[in-house]
Image: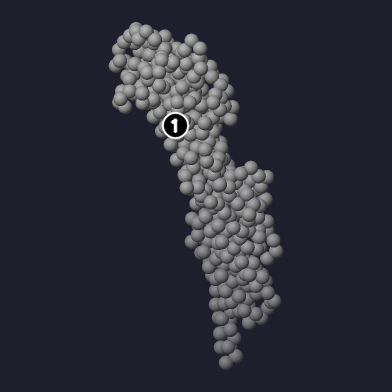
Amino acid sequence: MTLTQSTANASSSLSTISEQISIVSQNIARVNNADATRKVANVVSGPGGGVSVAGISRTANKLLLDTYLTANSNSQTQSVINSALDQLQNTVGDTDSETSPASLIAKLTSSLQDYSASPQNNAVGATVVTAAQELVNSLNSATQSVTDVRNQADSDIAASVNNINNLLSQFQTLNQQVVTGTSSGSDVTDALDARDAVLKQLSTEIGIRTVSRDNGDMAIYTDSGVTLFDKTSRTVTFQQSANLSPSAVGNPVYADGVPIAGTSHVMSISSGKLAGLVEIRDSIAPTYQSQLDEVARGLIETFAESDQSATPTLPDAAGLFTYGGGPAIPASGTVVPGLAGSIKVNPNVDPSQGGDASLIRDGGISDPGNPAYTYNTTGGSSYTDRIQQLITGLDTSLTFDPSSQIQQSGSVADYAKSSVSWLEALRQSASNEAESRQATADRATSSLSQATGVNLDEEMTNLLSLERTFQASSRLINTVDSMLSTLLQASG
């Protein structure tokens, strides 16, 4: 090898090492960036032994990325559900909580027993009304909380859809950069990192799967197979509801005109924040609301007054508890949507509203002065039959709507306990599942980071090695320069 060739090779080495050092320095600068992958200079040998950087590649692993996207979507689904269940559980506590309907029904029973022991004491009768009002307040408040959770979920669905559309728009721009750059041979590693970062964010909102194509092109589909991106981004649409009442049904979500959430469909998504929000709005919250409504209906039915005539002809009428449709009694065994929000203490028995608490003992709450609904026909102050009848009624088995997903028969007190237990069991199950899915997502994140991320120790080692190589190439140039100088002196 001639001295001139040696100098040329050493110069190409210095140039190549400089580029490699620059890339390593960039890696080190992005060591704390979770979306950055490790960049590597692709060094090739040239004629005569010289070297050059032919291009830059990155340490990518599509299998691990796809695993992460799936794990992240599943984790987000359960996280959203778990958060909503915590909100619902806080409205009633557990079966032992003083604010739960079950405990307040027990308190109402106790006040009736006290009134039965002192039927002539109107002050004790007033405590029955107070206990009934606390129970009503609990049901009203729980209904409002359920409505708030549904409306918040509906609002969050709109926000999620907006995020999805924005992310798809960003993906389209980055995907075009990748395709164009790949075709021209440009460095597209940064664009690929940015595109993967968008995919990670997108998987938070909705379950996705990706398909890679020539020139770095990529298509995106929902986990159910609906196209989200193929050359161009597809529009995801949703119409937010102004206010979801207990009887209202939320609007569906569409992707490219195909329903993917909010309605029964073979292409419905199964993961991502969007899937969890729809499940809260359309399944979990409405089911719990129906249980509250059945508790309210059971109370109205239990405390209803019947025609006491020798030959009864009048229908049962609402007594201590009534609602907007009173004095008629709701149909037995059928959910009345929103009843827990409209149930109230009958004003005719509430002293604070000019009512008479003694009507609990005597009857006639539904229609004061109507003898047909009067139980205490003699007007005796020691009369307790009606009070005892109410106490017994709270332990009498009723029929409940099976759509509420808990027991179909039992006392209203037992049903209320079953509802709280159902919610707590669901919340505990969701919490455990959320922890499990989060652990899976964390492992997927760690595996992806270890395989494709920047390792500071490794990069510092590479940097030291490149610096030594740079020094060796520099010494070679100095040596050749010295030899040339010696030859020139000798020839002169």
Question: For this rendering, which residue is in front, 189 or 317?
Answer: 317
Q: Residue at x 57, y 65 (%)?
A: 173
Image quadrant in which the N terminus is located: bottom right
Q: Residue at x 57, y 23 (%)?
A: 408
How many C-alpha atoms fall within 10 Å of the one at disc 1: few (<14), some, or many (≥20)? few
Q: Residue at x 33, y 9 (%)?
A: 381
User: Where residue 159 appears, x then y in whole percent?
Assistant: 50, 51
User: Where residue 124 appears, x then y in whole percent?
Assistant: 31, 15
Label 1 sits on a secondary structure element that is loop
Residue 79 visible? The answer is: no
Q: Is residue 344 above or below residue 368?
A: below
How many numbered tags mark residues here? Answer: 1
User: Where residue 2 appears, x then y in whole percent?
Assistant: 66, 81
Question: For this rendering, which residue is in front, 467 or 132?
Answer: 132
Question: For this rendering, which residue is in front, 3 or 453?
Answer: 453
Q: How is the image coloured?
A: one colour
Q: Is residue 76 above or below residue 163?
A: above
Question: Mark 1 — residue?
Answer: 324
Res. 132 image quadrant: top left
Looking at numbered disc 1 in the image, what kind of residue is underneath it? Gly
Q: Residue at x 47, y 47 (%)?
A: 242
Q: Is residue 49 above or below residue 424?
A: below
Describe residue 209's horizontal placement relative to residue 75 as left or right. right
Question: For this rendering, which residue is in front, 135 or 268?
Answer: 135
Image quadrant in which the C terminus is located: bottom right
User: Where residue 384 appears, x then y in whole percent?
Assistant: 39, 9
Describe residue 44's horizontal placement relative to residue 320 as left or right. right
